[in-house]
Image: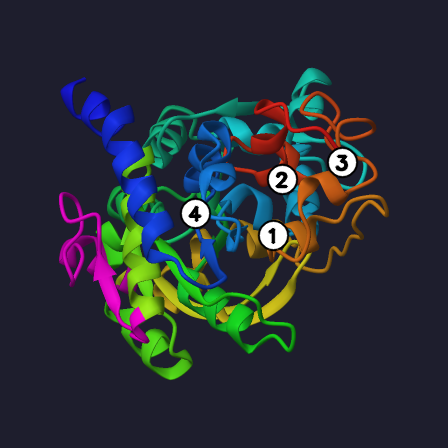
Amino acid sequence: MRYLDEYRDPALARQLLDEIHTTATRPWTLMEVCGGQTHTIVRQGIDNLLPAGLRMIHGPGCPVCVTPLELIDKALAIAARPEVIFTSYGDMLRVPGTGTDLLALRARGSDVRVVYSPLDAVRLAEQHPDRQVVFFAVGFETTAPANAMAVLRAHQLGLPNFSILVSHVLVPPAMTALLDAPDRQVQGFLAAGHVCAVMGWTEYEPIAHRYQVPVVVTGFEPLDLLEGILMAVRQLEAGHARVENQYARAVHRDGNSRAREAIRRVFRVRDRAWRGIGTIPDSGLALTDEFARYDAETRFAVSGLTAREHPACIAGDILTGAREPTDCTAYGTACTPRTPLGAPMVSTEGTCAAYHSAGRAS
């Protein structure tokens, strides 16, 4: 645990905070893209320790949170079928659909299982040739390589009873959509280190240049985030707009070439709906024609389902940083981790869950 202790050193944190206070001479607004970064910032109170004019906006960096409600309803429709073993990561089981969630569906007898890897779902398909095994493939670019490998493995084994329900989204188009918004607030980004470990940061360079915003690839521990904030503020104060890499111990400019190749082979880019936000062009992944037979949405004919958000949930405003969880009238009352109205209160990366676990009152 040596590295964990090093990146949480309080004396070094104080030094970085002092330098941020000295460097920031004007108000600035930064957005951290990753929900894991949001939880560290809120849990450690970093946002409350920054200079008064330096504001952190929490972005749409929780893959569970941005999975659209209609896709949750499609998952529920598939999971309810008696021939299906429906698999997913734990967070997804508690995300509410229109009328229920996957955990409640399992309690009523549906075969819904938590897996730790999509390859576990492939093994289930091998072990149960008489059942249809579906994996809910949710995530940003970080989880796409493993999901691609699951499809490639099922293809290699010739498994006719394995499919995935795809809900992959991409970070750069979301950043562009936020910067194109008429009420744009963001002046700089902390980019998610794990996404860049896969993809590198070349995709961010045109964004930094076009919109004149600094982008700092940043890790997830307190010192990572404080150093990333400092690097972004230095650029803003100097009038610079480029990509810098704070997370040098894990990220290289070109990312992981083998992981990128797996994504390129199995998936194609498509428009994708984001929960509470709407459709962002070229912001998601779908299976290529070569692997279209593994598309659960087509296999189970659920593509026509539509849904509407709970009227009290302001997930869209939370995910774009337009409002904070404490601005929601349901926060901490009708909406809690035990009784969530929307995904941001469910996921371990959700902003509402971060605020609630840190005890922030409305």
Looking at the picture, tell me which residue is in the foreground, 63 or 230.
230
Say above or below: 120 vs 246: above
Category of crowding for the residue at label 2, using alpha-carbon neighbours closer than 10 angstroms: few (below 14), some (14–19), many (at least 20): many
- Residue under numbered circle 3: 341
Look at the image and say whether residue 295 sits in the magenta stretch.
no
Q: Mark 1 and mark 4: span between their CA atoms?
A: 11 Å
Q: Nearer the viewer, mark 3 or mark 4?
A: 4
Category of crowding for the residue at label 4, using alpha-carbon neighbours closer than 10 angstroms: few (below 14), some (14–19), many (at least 20): many
Residue 116's x, y, as percent?
Answer: 38, 26
Contact, mark 2 vs mark 1 (Cβ under 8 Å): yes
Secondary structure type for disc 3: loop
| Residue 16 location, quadrant | top left
Amino acid type, label 3: Leu
Residue 133, can we see it? no
Secondary structure type for disc 2: helix
Q: Which residues are magenta?
A: 238-264
Q: Earlier in the sequence, mark 2 or mark 1?
A: 1
- Residue under numbered circle 1: 319
- Residue under numbered circle 4: 34
Secondary structure type for disc 4: loop
Q: Which mark is residue 344?
A: 2
